[in-house]
Amino acid sequence: MPATLANQAEKISSQPANLPANELLHGPLLSNLIRLALPTVAVLFMTTLLGVAETYFVSSLGLKAIAATSLVVPVMIMMTTVASAGIGGGVSSAIARATGARRQDEAESLAWHAVVIAVVAGGMFALVLLLAGPVLYRSLGGSGPSLNQAVLYSNILFGGAIPFWILLLLQASLRGAGNVKVPAMIILGGAVAGLILSPMLINGWLGAPRMGVAGAGVAQVLCNIAALGVVVVYMRSPSSTLRLRRYRLQRKHFSAILGVGLLSAINAVMSAMSVTALTAAAGAVSVAAIAGYGIASRLDMLLIPVMFGFGTAAITLVGTNLGAGNVARARRAAIVNVLFVASVVGLVGLVVSLFPLPWMGLFTSDSAAMAVGARYLHVVAPFYAVIGVIFELYFAGQGARRIFWPMTASVVRFVFALAAMVLVLQGYASLHTAFAIVAVSIVAAATISLLGFLRTRWDR
């Protein structure tokens, strides 16, 4: 697969010589990608560590508490992915194109439209999860104390959905304009605050109330609100290259964002629901299976900072170059990004597939939970490089406003995940077989994404 991409790169003609003096339009591709991605990767890694650390803090409350958070985490991942990689990708793509074409007023108007979208979308998520959360978590296998704790944790998290959405879309706006440092520093500050506040509220340290699982949710909401205040103050200041101010609402600007963002959001929902489907399959086995799969899949989350950080960098680089009319350089940027990210996450996958127990042992000593998690990592982790190909071609498609093939790949993965869930729930397959079906779906989706990229033109 990497060889195919390399061959395609060689066929693309060299960039025009009359481009403006802009690093994104003429600098070395890999160094530009790394410069744009590293701040986001670093701080998202810190944020992901916060999620992993919360699992560790919650583990002191027992297996039922781990199972409770494992029920909610896939839904929270879905909302975060819809906001950041879905609608946020549409925001970054639209603003990158406006910036590449030097239309500053349009870029700032798009940022204001992103705020309006965030309020509506965040409100919808909050309403649905507050009303339907108990039914959803029960359908995923929650019962008794685990279900009660999951509902409490969920109500707190999704009660703060609106400020969280605004925060994510404003950060996407800044990244689309090429400003990755400020969003990175804000995320870093929130992650550090969360690492301090979360264990305090979970365990009642330093005189704080001992809130248990609810403390993790309260800590996240408080940190998100504080981070939003910082980003708003910055974007209202003269220091920001992308100012946050009111603009007259225009249908064309909503269309510019949602034309990519809505389809990408559906893509994100299917990806997250694939995780939810496997959680439901694990729930049909036992509470230990839910906990084991939840712990193992948290390792998948450690890959997200790399894939998302470089993916958003690819959106900015691809979108800016296409806005400036440089199609060949945009496609080369996508190829370089795919090869680099697939190599990095693939190496991680090989290591953890060979040695899964040290990871599982960080969170539980329950033999049943460790066995389920180890089986998942043995089967799925060797395909992390292929997952990297899927993710990065998806982000490149967002930047180019060409997401039909990435969407098709997501549909395939989603159908496979649903099939795996149904087979387990009906007693026709084991959880191990479900993990094997997931691995097959990864290969199929990557093949579709790659063929789509090679067949799709970006100059129309």
Image (cartoon, helix red, strand yellow):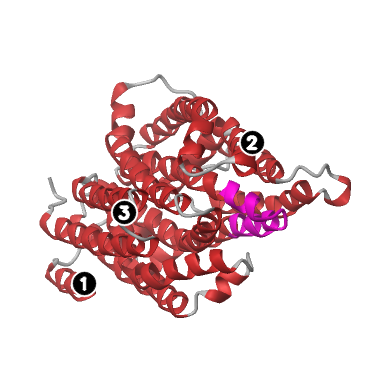
Using a 10 Å C-alpha cutoff, classify the residue at mark 2 as few (fewer than 14 neighbours), some (14 to 19) or many (20 or more): some
Query: x%, y% of residue 288?
Result: 55, 58
The crowding category of the residue bearing disc 1, from other C-alpha atoms within 10 Å (few below 14, some 14 to 19, many at least 20), is: few
Can residue 68 be seen here? yes
Circles 3 and 1, Cβ within 8 Å, touching? The answer is: no
In the rendered image, residue 337, in percent from the top left (x then y), is placed at 32, 65
Q: Where residue 26 sits in the image (x, y, percent)?
A: 30, 62
Which corner quadrant holds the C terminus?
top left
Residue 56 is one of the magenta-drawn residues: yes
In the rendered image, which residue does mark 2 sit on? 152
Q: Which residue is mark 1?
A: 1
Q: Main secondary structure of the magenta part?
A: helix
Question: Any mark on residue 420, and which?
Answer: 3
Residue closest to the eye, 111 or 380:
380
Give the mark, 2 or 3, whose residue is nearer the N terminus: 2
- Local crowd size for mark 3, using a 10 Å CA cut-off: few (<14), some (14–19), many (≥20): many
Magenta segment: 49-69
